[in-house]
Amino acid sequence: MTFSPELEARFDKLLKSYPAGRQRAAMVPMLIYAQDEVGCISDELIDEVAKRVGVTPLAVNEVLSYYSMLHRKPWGKYHVQICTNISCLLCDGDKLWEQAKEKLGIGHREVTADGQISLEEVECIGACSWAPAIQVNYDFHHFVTPAQLDQLLDGLRKKQ
Amino acid sequence: MLYNEPSPLETRVLSRRFGMPNSASIDTYLATDGYKAFMKASGMKPEAIIEEVKVSNLRGRGGAGFPTGMKWSFVPRTSPKPKYIVVNADESEPGTCKDRLLMEYDPHQLIEGVLIAGLAVDAHAGWIYIRGEYRYLIDIMEKAIAEAYQKGWLGKNIQGTGFDFDLYAHSGAGAYECGEESALLESLEGKRGIPRIRPPFPAVVGAFQCPTVLNNVETFCAVPPIIRDGGKAFADLGVPKAGGTKLTCLTGHVNKPGVYELTLGFPVMKMINEVGGGIRNGKKLKAFIPGGSSCPILTAAECEGATMDYDSMAARKSMLGSGGVVIMDEDTCMVKAALRIMRFYAHESCGWCIPCREGTTWLRKILTRFHEGNGTRSDIDLIGDLSKNMLGRTFCPLGDAAALPTISIVEKFREEFEDHLNGRPCPFEHANHMVTV
């Protein structure tokens, strides 16, 4: 499998970041960075990472199924993650979640037909004092109002 | 730009650089006493460093509150194995968002704290385990680490002291359980984040089977001020058995939510009313979680006279926890709060211990049907009984973390459960919102 030079450089650095013989430790960071470039964890990617860290593909499969950010199917171009955990709930994060589902016509961990937006109700994302909070890919949005969510989703529908 | 206006009631020790221009850069850090504590520590005997941390009365800021100096003293310095430092930056306790700021605004303070821990236990390598959702912080930490290497504050023979140290940022990939120390170590090693049986504790057998100091971000960040200004100065800021300050995240129904650095022993009502600007919309306080959703809940009456420290919270059968304060007003449905908290733990249970895996799942189901109006009278006691059955029966504290708030909500707000049976409307508008996770 071929990756961008930046990702290859990151892989090299990761493989040197752990004690000798412990390269398996690089597996999860490699998977998450590769997923960002490839779009999801494909069978081919599992084989590649297994080879590079020196374990079987089965061992990679076993590990990746544990982590909620690693996914086998592609998300939308913009993955909208709405927190409804306790601090966000108290600030109406659950209403934002309902609003987004209704507006996009998709549910939890689903993708719009054009592949543009996917939606996920997430557990605490560490933005509790600035609730309700949303993450789009890795970007945080704080103190989100219903009007702002509307605008945000409209923008993402058209965004390149 | 800061996320929230600072409060004049804060005591800014760890957060003193927040809001300074380019606060994350090494130049700003060096211009504001940065790395002075490391230089001082490099001239001290390791035992003296640990003694200074003991004098400071610093206790672990991740939630457990274990005395940091004592934890460090458990590392066998003379072991022939390499020793390691691991930073727990997997901040995911609901209500908690403070480590984010410590890394965003002052990453070098964290690096310096790690270096001093390295001197204390003879460690020469370390990892900062950062939750995957905090990608921008991984970038910030990697940039700071690169700067530190470039300017000779990491790597070989740091500033001519003869001390070598290598530091790496490690990305998690979404798992609350990996904030638990032994699960974090499993995850760091490239495995599923499942807790280890203890003993042995990480101080003796930690990362890669080697002796390891593992602390929360905030704990390490407290170390440079302690060494620089002396352990006593830090201890004097707090209360007798808990020194210094705590970054406290005010969340929920307050007028001024935000992260504030307050001295240990700060009065709870003063914190809510003066730092937090009181309850939103002129409502009354109903319930209070002192430090993340794992802590037993307090009623408004129990908050009177309470202070933000370990002993005051223990006296009220709760915990100081992680600093994630959750404030609920009089309109909050406590059944819904209990359900949302349980949904979280059911989602995050790693499945290793049966009481936790099954207990959280069944509690989520019972609380869901209860909140939807399909509960029975016997469910109320069943919720309490199932929770109590998880207590102390799991390898890691996640089972307790799910049980404790639930038990306290059922005990203290039983009448709200009765109300749901009697068809009284749930005070929340969207009462039926529930997702099957």
Image (cartoon, coloured by chain):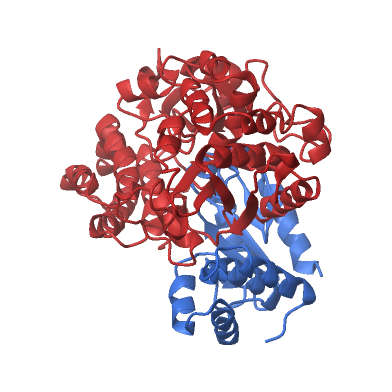
Please give the name of the residue rendered at 80% of the width and 50% of the height, measured from the top-left corner: B150
Nearer-the-camera pick, B150 or B80: B80
Residue A49 drawn at (x, y percent): 58, 79
Residue B88 drawn at (x, y percent): 52, 47
Give the quarter of the figure containing the C terminus of chain B. Answer: bottom left
The blue chain is A
Q: Judge whether B235 appears above or below B248 on screen.
A: above
Nearer-the-camera pick, B427 or B266: B266
Please give the name of the residue rendered at 77% of the width and 77% of the height, measured from the top-left corner: A4
Residue B122 drawn at (x, y percent): 53, 43
In this rendering, position of residue B328 left or right of residue A134: left
In this rendering, position of residue B13 left or right of residue A25: right
Give the quarter of the figure containing the N terminus of chain B. Answer: top right
Image quarter of residue B337: top left
Point out the residue furthest to the left here.
B378
The red chain is B
Residue A44 drawn at (x, y percent): 59, 87
Q: Does residue B277 show up? A: no
Nearer-the-camera pick, B118 or B255: B118
In this rendering, position of residue B235 left or right of residue B419: right
Q: Does residue A108 show up? A: yes
Count of numbered circles in the view: 0
